[in-house]
């Protein structure tokens, strides 16, 4: 595209970050290219300079400068997307209609790209089309967490789904295998968290009292089954959506999630052996963008099946709503 264009933001895209708005329309743009255009002032919102994380409002006008050309289309007609990649991501679908797409995200596959991450869910969404046809992310899962990932297939659907998460209308149930047997066996942990440099990496840790950087964090938990004193199968429900919340909270309780390379103890690392992260987004219940409720459930990943096999757990013994029996 070699000319300057002024595009009015669709009302259904209100609240979307500026950089994501661009990537939906021109997915061939790299983060580096896009951020350079924004930082240099070539991109403007209602005539004013903006930042990549500026939230757009419906009706605002975005100045779009001349953009780099898209790469030549690869095999299968998708820019850069190989047919086997398209087949792979379509094989992850657990639910799809005209407005909603739900995937069973594999462990080890990032949701979005970064400096060192070239393969990720966001790239693979080109299997459904580009520009406005491309499904939109409305929440995230850690790279090593498997399970339900829901997307909106239209701007309006994405906005409504995002709103459900923001208003805490989405109920998320995670399954986790943890070291030891938590006491009490069920309850709610309210423990503010803060990002902190630990050694040469950043982690989320319990905040000191009065720390102004602290984010409130709340996790509901219940024990589903136990493997003697060694390990427990837990259902976890985050009431807030902090980065690494479940992993940090379980470590703070003294029962880290098995297979976690970051939030662990020496004992949990030894017990984990060669297991990968034993955390799975099992079930997600939230309002459908048009009507009714969505109840989405993801089959266990191979990594979680390995953990269940090691400790003798049977996934069919679980109550689909393990929190339903509490505090009636």
Image (tube, grey):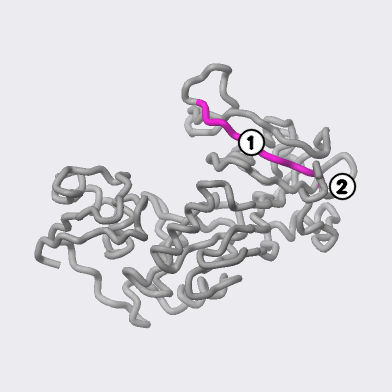
Report whether 86 appears left or right of 147: left
Tell me the residue at 69%/65% (across/down): 299
In the picture, the disc for residue 218 is 1
Tell me the residue at 32%/47% (across/down): 55
Tell me the residue at 81%/38% (across/down): 180
Q: Position of residue 128 (x, y in %)?
A: 42, 74
Q: Position of residue 214 (x, y in %)?
A: 52, 26
> Quick one: 211 or 114, which is closer to the camera?
211
In the picture, the disc for residue 20 is none
Magenta stretch: includes residue 52: no
Looking at the figure, which quarter contains the N terminus? Answer: bottom left
The crowd level at tag 1 (other Cα within 10 Å; few <14, some 14-19, many 20+) is many
Magenta stretch: give its range: 214-223
Q: Is residue 176 above or below residue 187?
A: below
The crowd level at tag 2 (other Cα within 10 Å; few <14, some 14-19, many 20+) is some
Disc 2 designates what residue? 227
Q: Main secondary structure of the magenta part?
A: strand
Where residue 134 sits, quadrant-wise, is bottom left
Label 1's element? strand
The extreme left residue here reads: 3
Report whether 203 appears left or right of 159: right
């Amino acid at each position: 595209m070699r000319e300057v264009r002024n595009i009015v933001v669709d009302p259904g895209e209100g609240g979307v970050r500026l950089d994501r708005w661009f990537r939906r329309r021109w997915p061939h743009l790299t983060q580096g290219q896009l951020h350079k255009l924004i930082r240099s002032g070539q991109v403007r919102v209602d005539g004013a300079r903006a930042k990549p994380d500026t939230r757009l409002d419906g009706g605002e006008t975005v100045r779009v400068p001349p953009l780099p050309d898209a790469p030549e289309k690869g095999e299968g007609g998708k820019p850069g997307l190989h047919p086997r990649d398209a087949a792979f991501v379509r094989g992850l679908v657990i639910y799809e209609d005209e407005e909603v797409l739900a995937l069973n995200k594999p462990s080890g596959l990032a949701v979005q790209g970064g400096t060192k991450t070239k393969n990720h869910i966001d790239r693979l969404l080109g299997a459904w089309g580009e520009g406005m046809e491309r499904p939109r992310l409305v929440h995230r899962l850690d790279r090593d967490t498997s399970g339900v990932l829901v997307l909106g297939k239209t701007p309006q659907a994405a906005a409504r789904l995002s709103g459900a998460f923001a208003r805490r209308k989405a109920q998320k149930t995670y399954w986790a295998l943890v070291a030891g047997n938590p006491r009490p066996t069920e309850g709610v942990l309210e423990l503010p968290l803060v990002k902190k440099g630990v050694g040469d990496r950043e982690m989320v840790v319990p905040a000191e009292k009065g720390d102004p950087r602290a984010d409130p964090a709340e996790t509901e938990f219940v024990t589903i089954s136990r493997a003697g004193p060694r390990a427990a199968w837990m259902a976890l429900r985050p009431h807030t959506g902090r980065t690494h919340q479940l992993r940090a909270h379980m470590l703070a309780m003294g029962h880290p999630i098995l297979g976690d390379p970051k939030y662990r103890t020496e004992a949990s690392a030894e017990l984990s052996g060669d297991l990968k992260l034993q955390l799975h987004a099992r079930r997600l219940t939230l309002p459908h963008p048009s009507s009714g409720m969505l109840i989405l459930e993801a089959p266990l990943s191979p990594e979680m099946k390995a953990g269940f096999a090691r400790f003798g757990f049977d996934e069919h013994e679980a109550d689909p709503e393990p929190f339903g029996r509490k505090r009636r």
